[in-house]
Amino acid sequence: MTSWWSALMLGLLGAAVADGSRIGGVMLTAKRWPWSRPGQRAPFVVGLLIRAGSAGILSAVVALQQIVGWSDQPLALFVLGIATPTVVQHTTRLGRAVARACFKSGWGWPVRGHGVSVIGK
């Protein structure tokens, strides 16, 4: 059985591999750092920490749950850490797109700028 802290570390390492390869590819293509000004460094680092933290926490939670049959496999937890940042990023994009579509169509959500609901119109 894998302990929760070793699963956390495997998830963090997986996220570091995923984000490191992505950032390395950007740096090789652009031949510069991923940020253009020094003031953009802090949001970039915070974003990486959030992505890595979500991967580590998810891997630790999966290891704590003994219902899942592969939760004691280190390779599975590492791969989960690799996939988590990408899944979270795409899910966030999808959520934003759905929210924008709902605001534009007026499905009972408040219309931006009016402050009133469009239900019953």
Image: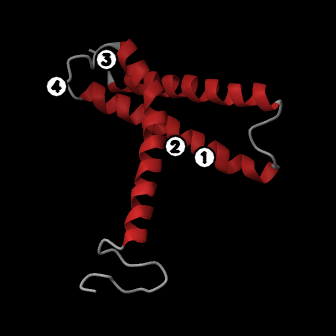
Q: Counting other residues with Cα less than 10 Å from the Cα at mark 4, is it few (<14), some (14-19), or many (20 or more)? A: few
**From this viewpoint, which residue is outermost toward the left?**
67
Q: Earlier in the sequence, mark 4 or mark 2?
A: 2
The residue pinned by badge 3 equals 2
Percent x, y of residue 120:
24, 85
Looking at the image, residue 103 lies above or below residue 73: below
The amino acid sitting under disc 1 is: Val
The residue pinned by badge 4 equals 67
CA distance for labels 1 and 3: 28 Å
- SS of the residue under disc 2: helix
Left or right of 63: which side holds 74? right
Q: Which of marks 1 and 4 is nearer the N terminus?
A: 1
The residue pinned by badge 1 equals 46
The amino acid sitting under disc 3 is: Thr
The amino acid sitting under disc 4 is: Ile
CA distance for labels 3 and 2: 23 Å
- Quadrant of the snapshot with the C terminus: bottom left
- SS of the residue under disc 1: helix
Percent x, y of residue 54:
44, 39
Q: Do the residues labelled 1 and 2 touch (CB within 8 Å)?
A: yes
Percent x, y of residue 60:
35, 30
The amino acid sitting under disc 2 is: Ile
